[in-house]
Image (tube, rainbow, N blue to C red):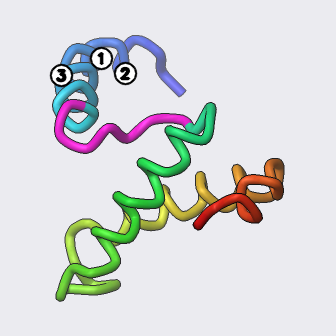
Amino acid sequence: MNAHSHSTRAPEFVKTWSTLQNQTSVRSIRNEDDYRKMVALANELADQPEGEEGPLAKLFGVLTDLIEVWEIHHPDVLTTQT
């Protein structure tokens, strides 16, 4: 992997990531509040009419992976949800 060719794209990635975070709050799940936010966002994406073929399907996949890992490591959160 050529680090130099990727470093010239870094400012573009930073701008894009910042925009995505500001619009969706996508981030690592570090606590129950983050967990609830990611579940709510995943539920919102799941309700999109395009489904698995839509432009946000990959984002949905990333979110559900993050949620699944959190749930595996924090099973107590599942039993306290109402």
Q: Is residue 36 placed above or below 46 in the rendered structure? A: above
What label sits on residue 6 in the rendered view? 2
Which element type, helix, strand or loop, lies under badge 3?
helix
Q: Position of residue 48 (x, y in %)?
A: 21, 80
**Does the magenta-highlighted stretch encompass residue 25?**
yes
Tell me how far mark 1 sits from mark 3, CA to CA: 9 Å
Label 2 amino acid?
His
Residue 71: x, y in percent?
A: 73, 57
Check disc 1 and give the amino acid type: Ala
Given this view, does label 1 or label 3 mark the residue nearer the observer?
A: 3
Magenta residues, start to end: 22-28
Query: Nearer the N terminus, badge 3 or badge 2?
Result: 2
Quadrant assignment, res 19 = top left
* Residue 49 percent coordinates (x, y): 18, 88
Query: Could you tell me which quadrant the N terminus lies in?
Result: top right
Which residue is the site of mark 1? 10
